Image (spheres, rainbow, N blue to C red):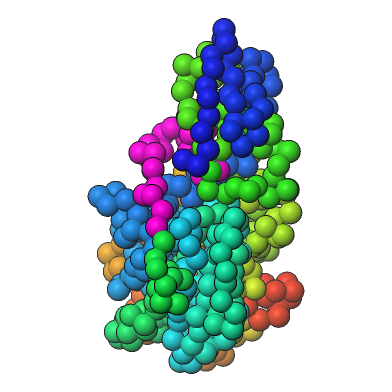
Amino acid sequence: MKNLFLLIVVGLNLVLFSCHTNKPIQLSTDPDEAKNIAKEAYIFSYPLLMGYQAQYFTTMAGSPGYRGPLNEITNDTVPADHRRKDVVSMNGDTPYSAFGIDLRAEPLVLSVPEMKDRYYVFQCIDLFTHNFAFIGTRATGTEAGDYLFVGPGFEGEIPEGKFKKVFHSESQFVTIVGRTQLKGKADLPNVVAVQNKYKLRPLSEFTGEKPMSAPEPNWIPLNPEEFADARFIKYANFYLSMIEPFHPQDTSALNRFEKIGMVSGATFDSANYQPEVLTAITEGIKEAQMEIKNKAENIAERVNGWNMLNAFGPREFYNGDWLLRAAAVMVGIYGNDMVEAFYPVAYVDMDDEVLDGSKHHYKIEFTKDEIPPAKYFWSITLYNKHADGVGGYMSENEINRYLINSSTEGLKYDQDGGFRVYVQHETPTKEDEKSNWLPAPDEPFYLMLRVYGPETSALEGSWEPPGIVKND
């Protein structure tokens, strides 16, 4: 770690001397204070924790969801299905080119080919889950281009005139989620051919200079159960060391968090805390988790039972609203900005009852005017709630159908140009309903409607999705 800390135990208190501030940091011995700070710190840190889990699982060989090491593009050669459980609410429309980059040694260059025949996007996310950059059809156009990513504190020279854009990240670690449109099963070889043209390389390789290196990340072995008590602090401390210098918006809060041991690069040892303080921290975490869950379930204005989700964006979008940021992660980590993709989410039907495949059959009826107004395409995907009771994964079913979208083969429209989607656990008995059947699990579930490239009517709210009605 680039920060070293001298730990001095004085009685029941732990004092830390930070080398970058040289100021003593004393752990709180007041349970009430520790509880309140822990609640605030957990809400602040929730994106770091979920991001740590996602990046750890995808970059550590042998772990669930392993994709490949940092600084190496990894492409999905098939769309996501019920087996994908590395992040919640994944889409099945656009095979992912998802990877992490490490900017500690030097900047990195992402190169993309010309792309005129299909939608694509590379969404670039810092450790706070802020979407700080986009490359793709909407944001940068269809031309080929080279894009440079620069980490915090970089002091080297950036060549002029060589890059279409230069992006500066708040954090040394970045997650990049590439999505390339799939136009039906037969189109998959074309998607793979496009993915093979994406290229990532260090700036030194791009310019023909001597490469730089950084030590391997000293990952903390992940145990998600530790997120539920004071041990969450060690994961937050690891990632905080990748985010220096801190953004001025966060400085005062991070100073408060030091009283529960949340300090950039510091180690965590529960033996240094009074037992009642550890208990208080756990209580604060439980309250934080409940607040995040409540916010996630009511994250947006509800229209016809759909939460009109607009909860993802850059730091400026959140403007210090950490609860919204955390709830957005719980609903679906790594969601796009609304201008890129709009995500109405439904947990209830038009009677305001929780969607549950063990209790009801459902129907969604789209008139021609209600079809999602997308510049590129739209989809409806079904998920269980197995991740945390709110978010979850695609649900296994007998026909291997996880979504219905604008390119679904065999989707039947009525004579007026509208269509119906039948959402139920049992196979429909009518033949004309089978083609438009979205299988539901025998348990509670939720639906996510994705509008890629939303038109003005969706962005401004004049378009409303039809409600989900019981069809028993």
Q: Can residue 26 be seen in this view?
A: yes
Q: Give residue 115's position: percent from left, percent from top.
A: 47, 88
Above or below for 128 versus 15:
below
Q: Depth check: give the residue in front, 32 or 458.
A: 32
Most extreme residue toward the left is: 62
Q: Give residue 218's position: percent from left, percent from top.
A: 39, 43
Q: Quick check: is 226 in the magenta stretch?
A: yes
Q: Depth check: give the residue in front, 307 or 79.
A: 79
Above or below for 2 versus 177:
above
Residue numbers of the magenta segment: 213-240
Number of numbered discs visible in the structure rendering: 0
Name the quadrant containing residue 79.
bottom left
Q: Which residue is drawn at 45% across and 81% down?
A: 112
Most extreme residue toward the front is: 210
Q: Give residue 376's position: percent from left, percent from top.
A: 54, 84
Above or below for 140 versus 421:
below
